[in-house]
Amino acid sequence: MERVTIDRIIDGVAVCAAGPGALKRIPVEELPAGADEGSVLDRVDGVWTVNAELTEQQRAYVASELYYEHEDGSPAMREDAGIPW
């Protein structure tokens, strides 16, 4: 089994994190339905599928690192999130 996370999709190619410092490029035609940036994909017997459980866990973790709630419950981005813009 192979596992990657879609980082971005550019010009018909999904650029995926495939391990520490490793990237893999997958043509969008090979992506499963519903796959988008942030999706965790598993490849078994040559077929990519979205790992819904890991995708949700990863998105929740990223959101917790980037955002917090004000006392009134409204969201705000952390100033120390390391976003370059």
Image: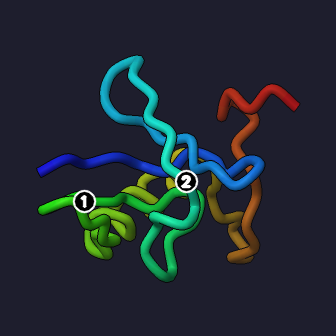
Residue at (65, 64) in percent of width and height: 69
Disc 1 residue type?
Answer: Asp
- First in sequence: mark 2 vs mark 1: 2
Q: Secondary structure at mark 1?
A: strand
Viewer-proximal residue, 61 or 45? Answer: 45
Q: Secondary structure at mark 2?
A: strand
Viewer-proximal residue, 84 or 48? Answer: 48
Q: Which mark is residue 79?
A: none
Residue identifier under label 2: 27
Is 21 above or below relative to 63? above
Is 63 above or below relative to 22? below
Disc 2 residue type?
Answer: Pro
Gap between marks 2 and 1 measured at Cα: 15 Å
Residue at (38, 70) in percent of width and height: 56
Residue 82 on image: x %, y %: 68, 27
Q: Tell which tag, 2 or 1, sits nearer the viewer.
A: 2
Residue 54 on image: x %, y %: 28, 63
Q: Does 3 sit left or right of 56 as displayed?
A: left
Location of the C terminus by quadrant is top right
Residue identifier under label 1: 42
Q: Does 30 sit left or right of 44 as displayed?
A: right
Q: Does 62 sit left or right of 76 as displayed?
A: left
Is 47 above or below relative to 15? below
> Dot 2: few (<14), some (14–19), or many (≥20) neighbours within 10 Å?
few
